Amino acid sequence: MGRAFSAPERVVLLIDEIDKADLEFPNDLLHELDRMRFTITETGETIAARHRPVVIITSNAEKELPDAFLRRCVFHFIDFPTTDLMGRIVDVHHPDLDDVLLNQALAAFYAVREMDRIRKKPSTSELIDWIAMLRLAQPDAIALDESTPFLGTLLKKEQDLTAFNDQITGRHRRRY
């Protein structure tokens, strides 16, 4: 924020994943952005904005943000990428990826995201990392079964790995 305030021209300030910050951070941030200045407590130096930056703040909605904070925001929801868009995103990171591997990985990825009991659904970054691992191993095919390669790259919680295994082996059936 100090660099954005000190910039000789108007800049964009990105504050990523604000929902992961301490509870008081959004309200503290509002105060500083409203005043367009802040003081570094340790040095006593005051940083004042030369130009009001364009502030973009992201949230994964993991915890509720204060109403006073939200009232001052313009909200824009970005839906999870479609398969086609995800293919283009993957292409940026793996431009020479074989189409067969890409299509199998995308199908498996979206199937895992649709599983009932998966709590932390794999994200775009997990897919990109998973594909990097798959490229190294060069599997003949990707199937969702007990031998799905590098599953820990997609699923990061033990309960999700258990839910995956239960679902593909049929040990857990959803009751209606």
Image (tube, grey):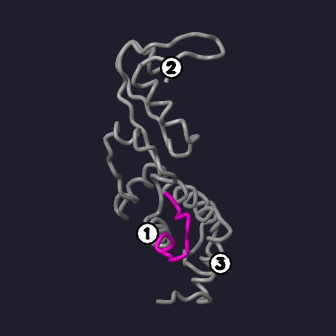
Question: What main secondary structure does the magenta stretch of the protein show?
Answer: loop
**71 sits to left or right of 98:** left
- Identify the residue at the far front of this view: 68
- Name the residue rendered at 55%, 89% in the picture: 173
User: Where does the magenta region start and end?
Assistant: 111-123
**153 sits to left or right of 84:** right
Of marks 1 and 3, the one in the foreground: 3
Task: Say which residue label 1 marks.
Answer: 103
- Identify the residue at the far right of this view: 158
How far is disc 1 from disc 3 in space, using C-alphas?
Answer: 18 Å
Which of the two discs, 1 and 3, labels the residue nearer the N terminus?
1
Tag 2 and tag 3, C-beta contact below 8 Å: no
Q: Nearer the viewer, residue 109 or 103?
A: 109
* Element type where label 1 sits in the image: helix
- Residue type pointed to by label 2: Gly
Please check the rendered image and state whether residue 17 is part of the magenta-colored stretch, yes or no.
no
- Name the residue rendered at 53%, 11% in the picture: 46
Please check the rendered image and state whether residue 115 is part of the magenta-colored stretch, yes or no.
yes
Task: Say which residue label 3 marks.
Answer: 147
Q: x, y (%) of residue 29?
A: 48, 30
Q: Alpha-carbon neighbours of circle 1 within 10 Å: few (<14), some, or many (≥20)?
A: some
- Residue type pointed to by label 1: Asn
Which of the two discs, 2 and 3, labels the residue nearer the N terminus?
2
- Name the residue rendered at 35%, 16% in the picture: 51
